[in-house]
Image (tube, rainbow, N blue to C red):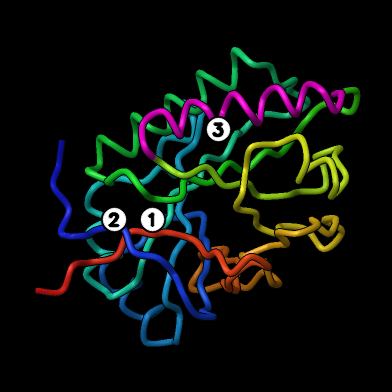
Amino acid sequence: MDVLSGGAENAIQVMNGFSCDKRLSAIQAGQFYEDGYRFCLRGFYTEANKIQKSLNHEEVVNILNSGLAIMPVQNINKLNWKPSAKLARIHGEQLVKDAKALGMPAGLNLWCNITGLAGDVSIQDVIFYGNNWCDAVMEQGYIPALFVNSCIPLSGNQLFCYLNFKHFCRNHEQAPHIPELGYELFRNPIINEAGNRVYKYRLQLNQQGIGSTWLKKIKW
């Protein structure tokens, strides 16, 4: 396992960040920091043919050295797929394995980005998937978090009452309000930076005063 000069840190104030779909060089990461961004959401992908978009150690070091914090996201590159408890365990355990392989410590938020669900997926299927994914992540000391996209067929009340997630990102303009918790991450319009498709995000504390926990370089 590679060792990173970073540790888990709680985000306690409003900050701007971004996600992108290509690996960041040291120069690119530094430019984002100079432009006022303070964190980066970068993805692990579940499909082998998307390996070129997955995080590696060099990129994580580039991000941390720039002054940016980082939170990993699991993106599922499938269309019309059906969630299950078994698949959730596979996905969650793989994300934990990938995070540990990069030296990411326990205590971080690991984000689940569910897209491409089949149209006939039931609410119960999504609940089983979400909670088993949570279990797989929490068992290893990480904190599960969920991107709420338009394909997730749950209301705000159902997200709050039936899922074990306590951290949410409003990743679609029609995402429902979540009672008592609300969102701590909000996606803004897409931009393009030198051929890299970038989504801007705003981070804040949720309605209970709880924020995200990310990986940040340790200052000696």
> Toward the viewer: 8 or 3?
8
Compare residues 22 and 42 and report the one nearer the observer.
42
What amino acid type should be assigned to the residue bearing mark 2? Glu
Q: Quick one: 42 or 197, which is closer to the camera?
A: 42
Residue identified by numbered label 1: 23
Distance of label 1 from label 3 (alpha carbons): 27 Å
Q: Amino acid at mark 3?
A: Cys
The numbered disc on residue 59 is 2
Q: Position of residue 37 (x, y in %)?
A: 45, 79
Q: Where is residue 94, by image quadrant?
A: top left
Q: Provide residue 58's location: percent of width, then percent of height.
A: 22, 53
Image spot of residue 82 (x, y percent): 75, 20
Q: Which residue is mark 3?
A: 134
Q: Which residues are magenta?
A: 121-141
Which structural element holds mark 3? helix
Q: Amino acid at mark 1?
A: Arg
Q: Is residue 195 above or below residue 165?
A: below
